Image (cartoon, rainbow, N blue to C red):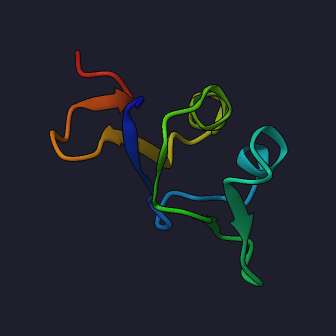
Amino acid sequence: MGDRWQVQVDRSLCIGSAQCVHRAPDAFHLDTGRQSHPTEPETDAGERILAAAENCPVEAITVTVLGSGEAVFPPEE
């Protein structure tokens, strides 16, 4: 069994670029105000979700390991 992730979008930062939806259409959707939402805030770890977070132009997406809270993206410095 692999890691489970907590996926969050800071909607105060989200600009509705839809890069997350393009990278992981099964994991993100935009609401009528063009704000991103994870379809499943608690999900299995996956490259597409990570790519969506990495390609967000304003780094509005955070991904942590469910349970431990360890940062996946953005990485801790």
Furthest residue in direction bottom, as rendered: 32
22 vs 77: above or below? below
| Percent position of residue 23, x then y | 78, 38
Residue shown at 80%/51% (left/top)? 25
Please indicate whether residue 53 sits to the left or right of residue 29 in the image.
left
| Percent position of residue 9, x then y | 48, 58
Residue shown at 62%/25% (left/top)? 47
**Residue 41 or residue 36, whichever sits in front:** 41
| Percent position of residue 51, x then y | 65, 28
| Percent position of residue 26, x then y | 75, 54
Please indicate whether residue 3 sits to the left or right of residue 19 in the image.
left
Please indicate whether residue 40 sits to the left or right of residue 74 in the image.
right
**Residue 60 or residue 52, whichever sits in front:** 52
Residue shown at 39%/29% (left/top)? 74
Furthest residue in direction right, as rendered: 22
**Residue 6 or residue 18, whichever sits in front:** 6
Quadrant assignment for the C terminus: top left
Residue shown at 21%/32% (left/top)? 70
Please indicate whether residue 2 sits to the left or right of residue 68 in the image.
right
